[in-house]
Amino acid sequence: MAALSSLASALESYRGRDRLIRTLGYCCQLVGGVLVEQCPARSEVGTRLLTLSSQLSHCRTVLRLFDDMAMFIYTKQYGLGAEEEDFFVRGVSVLGNLADQLYYPCEHIAWAADAKILRADSARWWTLSTAFWGLSLLLGIARSLWMVLKLRQRLRDPAVAFTSRLPRSKRRALEAQVQSEVLTLLSNLADLANAVHWLPPGVLWAGRFPPWLVGLLGTVSSLLSVYQAVRAGDWTEATAP
């Protein structure tokens, strides 16, 4: 009953619902892709699951039409990261916020072009939005790598290596932060692989992933995000596209 209550609470929030829709969509793509490619007898079921995955993705795209203001407020509040002590973290965070902010209008224009609301080349705008997403992921990966290195360096520093110098609670907090950054790093790497796949052909491995692999990478990223949200007890964090 407690699990059902937590699930219901998550579904009542926009971010929690978005996170669960994303996970379900990628799971459908994973299973559907496997059935279509490996089980010809069940290809019809696989095709239906792929269609469901596409519709769930479209649902999230429409819902993101209303994310610009929240992103703008977050970007404005963070500013130039004056509260960050680390200059590198401040720099990549500011650039990441800028990439995220530019991602949304590009995606909106692409969606509107596909829906025949605007006269524009939707493929060009989809490519631009994906490029901004990939840039944001790259910056996030750089930030997580830097944080993991700095935190591990601090934990291994002889000056604070002993519990007498570093309280046990503080050490556990640092270790938990390292684990969180590693999970974020893995999640961003999985998303980055998909982001490159959705770029125009000729860019690295763009267009070469079968549906099941896209679903697998997205499922891994989504489950890591859900795990971190559950562990932190916070379903309100922004989620990836």
Image (cartoon, rainbow, N blue to C red):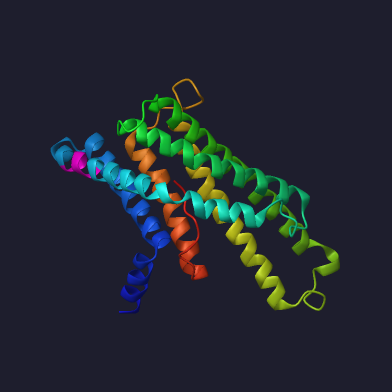
Depth check: 149 or 199 in front?
199
> The N terminus appears in which quarter of the rendering?
bottom left
Q: Residue at x 67, y 47 (%)?
A: 94
Q: Residue at x 72, y 59 (%)?
A: 151
In this view, 138 is above or below 69: above
In the rendered structure, does residue 46 fall within the stretch colored magenta?
yes
- Residue 113 at what x, y percent from top left? 35, 31
- Give the farthest residue toward the front: 118
In the rendered structure, does residue 191 fall within the stretch colored magenta?
no
| Principal secondary structure, stretch drawn in magenta | helix
Q: Quadrant of residue 45?
A: top left
Q: Quadrant of residue 41?
A: top left
Horizontal side of residue 229 vs 161, given as left or right: left
- Residue 206 at what x, y percent from top left? 45, 27
In this view, 240 is above or below 229: above
- Give the farthest residue toward the top: 202
- Residue 160 at what x, y percent from top left? 82, 69
Depth check: 131 or 47 in front?
131
Range shown magenta:
45-49
Q: Residue at x 27, y 44 (%)?
A: 55
Depth check: 191 or 240 in front?
240
Depth check: 83 or 20 in front?
83
Total residue callouts: 0
- Residue 46 at what x, y percent from top left? 21, 41
Q: Quadrant of residue 175?
A: bottom right
In this view, 127 is above or below 220: above
Horizontal side of residue 83 vs 23, given as left or right: right
Horizontal side of residue 30 vs 136, given as left or right: left
Q: Residue at x 34, y 54 (%)?
A: 21
